[in-house]
Image (cartoon, rainbow, N blue to C red):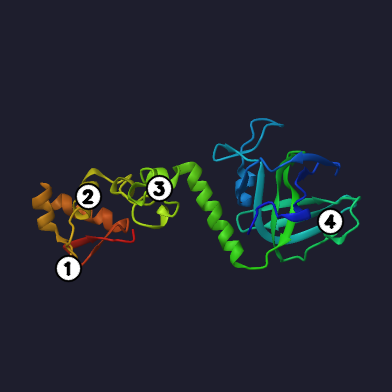
Amino acid sequence: MNSYFGGGEDGGGFVGGSQGGSQTARPINDESLRPVTIKQLIDAEQAFGDAPFRIDGVEIKQVTLVGMVRQISPQTTNITYRLDDGTGIIEVKQWLDADKQDDSSRRTFREEEYVRVWGRLKSYGNKRHVGAHVIKPVADINEVNYHMLECTYVHLFFTKGDPAAAAGGGGAAGGDEDSMFVDGGYGANADDKTRGYSAKAKKMYNHLNNSIGNNEGTNMHVIAQETGMSIQDVMAAAEELLGHGAIYTTLDDETFAILDCY
């Protein structure tokens, strides 16, 4: 996708969608666009009737979503689509421009066809819908999965923080924008990985993490000796770490190593 705004005359460069179907010239180039799921739109917070919607505590303006057309209801001034993306169902209204005589403003889509929508979340009569600026068919089914991954990434960005910041502003990656894909990226340090673990589990994990050059793992008796933990504490920590998939057994049931892909 070269542009979330659809590009060309389809995008229009304006925000349409008053309830009466009139078009209001309002530039959208300076407004952010957020990929969302339908559940996020349904759960979006709104302080009062005319207040902006917020997702993850952040105000949303333009949104884009991908879903399957479940129902089509043509009207005189608009076409209403019921869109389903697996997380929920919402109505998408595409207002018809009477001044346009070309087919693009009146194109309809088939039921059970995947489409991408660019628009704005609205509420009318306590019922939410998306006022669409642009609707286009999904040419590649991989776009459906891509959109869900993008929604997840943006959600984590706003709830967990900037991945680059989580790596210490880029750390060893030197601020490279691809640092989230290499060592030193998001969640790469031991503190992030052991967040929520017990003190014993953290101690054992950190010891294993700092045991460089030992591909065969470390025996529980060695761990106990070098960390000052009792065998019982090491066993309890190992059980917790195994349950989280953070470590695995190597030579035997008493020898452990860090799971590198964790």
Asked whether the beta carbons under mark 3 and mark 1 sit within 8 Å of each other, the answer is no
Task: Give the residue at mark 2.
Answer: 206
Relative horizontal placement of residue 111, taking residue 193 as reference (left or right): right
Q: Earlier in the sequence, mark 1 or mark 4?
A: 4
**Label 2, label 4: how far apart the Cα atoms are:** 60 Å
Q: Earlier in the sequence, mark 3 or mark 4?
A: 4
Residue 140 is situated, as x and y percent measured from the top left of the image, at 63, 68
What's the amino acid at mark 4? Answer: Ser
- State the residue at coordinates (72%, 66%): 112
Which residue position is annotated with label 3?
A: 175
Q: Residues within 10 Å of mark 2 (few under 14, many from 20)?
A: some
Chain-order first, disc 2 or disc 3: 3
- Give amino acid for label 3: Gly
**Label 3 packing within 10 angstroms: few (<14), some (14-19), many (20+):** some
Q: Position of residue 178 (x, y in %)?
A: 44, 55
Residue 31 appears in which quarter of the rendering?
top right
